[in-house]
Amino acid sequence: MAKGSVKKVVLAYSGGLDTSVILRWLVETYGCEVIAFSADLGQAEELEGLDEKARRTGASKVYIEDLREEFVRDFVFPMFRAAAVYEGSYLLGTSIARPLIAKRMVEIAEAEGADAVAHGATGKGNDQVRFELTAYALNPDIRVIAPWREWDLNSRERLIDYAERHGIPVPVTKAKPYSSDRNLLHISFEGGILEDPWREPDEDMFVLSVSPEKAPDEPEYVEVEFEAGDPVVVNGERLSPAALLQRLNEIAGRHGVGRVDIVENRFVGMKSRGVYETPGGTIWRAAHRAVESLTLDREVMHLRDSLVPKYAELVYNGFWYAPERETLQAFMDEAQRNVTGTARLKLYKGNCTVVGRKSPHSLYDPETATFEEDTVYDQADATGFIKLNALRLRTLKRLVG
């Protein structure tokens, strides 16, 4: 794309180091108008002063939109209905935010008559794929500018130097260079000192949770009620999606619940070390599974569980708007129709333990499951059941040895 051919760009702008530099770089390199777009997904104080900062850095217009309810209701909820977890540990907090940000970026570009959209994802990471797959899925003809794949500012040190030369205030210093990404579901940390996978994260890095060692010496109980697979009530209080997740974050965070330190496999082919805090999501996932244990048919649960890695991979890799993810979602949602009930959990020094569950759609039958005398299960029936299942094993041994 010729640089002079772009007249107006919508930039996904966070106010952090990368996008602050990118905003000025776009103006200088392309000679274009830049519209900054910031999505409020629960960053809290990080959005303060963002409008003024973007304009001082060169933005002609600034969109700051509160998307917290949409984020949790339309993205986090369906993802958790699918029980999605990537590589056994990562609850996809950053991954699930990208399709919403990219969707609004494309919508704003269309409304403003912009030639292109731009993002601050690096050429090594997953976010470039997530942003651009979403953009192309929603507008096949959209132009995308990815500065990290064009410029020579290919390190944190060079970015910081550029910012200092242009008088751009940034929240990262050379002494503390790791980056973070925060929304209502989680906060992630990567880069800098964390690039050594042997090094333990500094305690003062964590934001959403206290150290388990410093958590209260008494456990706290929390009850989460679900309707058709979605959490709707916490400790007897019905809450909106965003408010519910915020409440779970507060409860779990004070007990040190939800910290994860992993080395994951990026879509682009490399391994990456990430440290995540997902306090509310950790409670949510455990409570959801507890209610499912009562309400999901065995074969439906096992089939669903076999599809979770694929679903999680699609979210992680940026295929939220792909037909295969939407098809999988239809199955996941059908499986959740009767996942209604309440789970009770005990939180204590980093642990989240299910201690109770109940449901009006429970498939658990005490009369059948009891070890005491009953009238609904003839134990002698097990003889034929076992012999039929053993038939092929016995035949194999007899004929082959």
Image (spheres, rainbow, N blue to C red):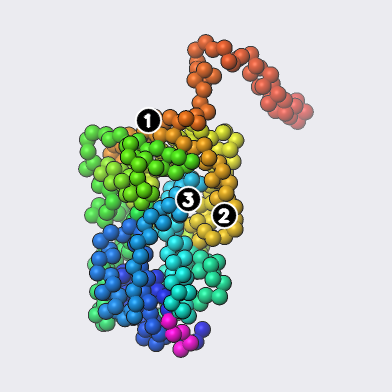
Q: Which of the 4 image quarters holds residue 54? A: bottom left
Q: Which of the 4 image quarters holds residue 386? A: top right
Q: Residue at x 50, y 29 (%)?
A: 362
Q: Earlier in the sequence, mark 1 or mark 3?
A: 3
Residue 155 visible, this angle: no
Residue 140 visible, this angle: yes
Which residue type carries mark 2? Glu
Placement of 48 over or under 230, stated as above or below:
below
Q: Earlier in the sequence, mark 3 or mark 2?
A: 3
Q: Secondary structure at mark 2?
A: helix
Labels 2, 1: front one: 2
Identify residue for label 1. 355
| Residue 170 picture location, percent across and down | 26, 71
What span is colored magenta in the figure?
4-8
Per the model, the C-alpha gap separating discs 2 and 1 is 34 Å
Q: Which mark is residue 79?
A: 3
Near-viewer residue (370 or 240): 240
Which residue type carries mark 1? Val
Q: Which mark is residue 90?
A: none
Q: Secondary structure at mark 1?
A: strand
Per the model, the C-alpha gap separating discs 1 and 3 is 25 Å
Which residue type carries mark 3? Met
In the image, taking residue 398 as reference, residue 285 lies left or right, namely left
Crowding at dot 2, Cα within 10 Å, few <14 / some 14-19 / many 20+, comes out as: some
Identify residue for label 2. 326
Near-viewer residue (379 or 238): 238
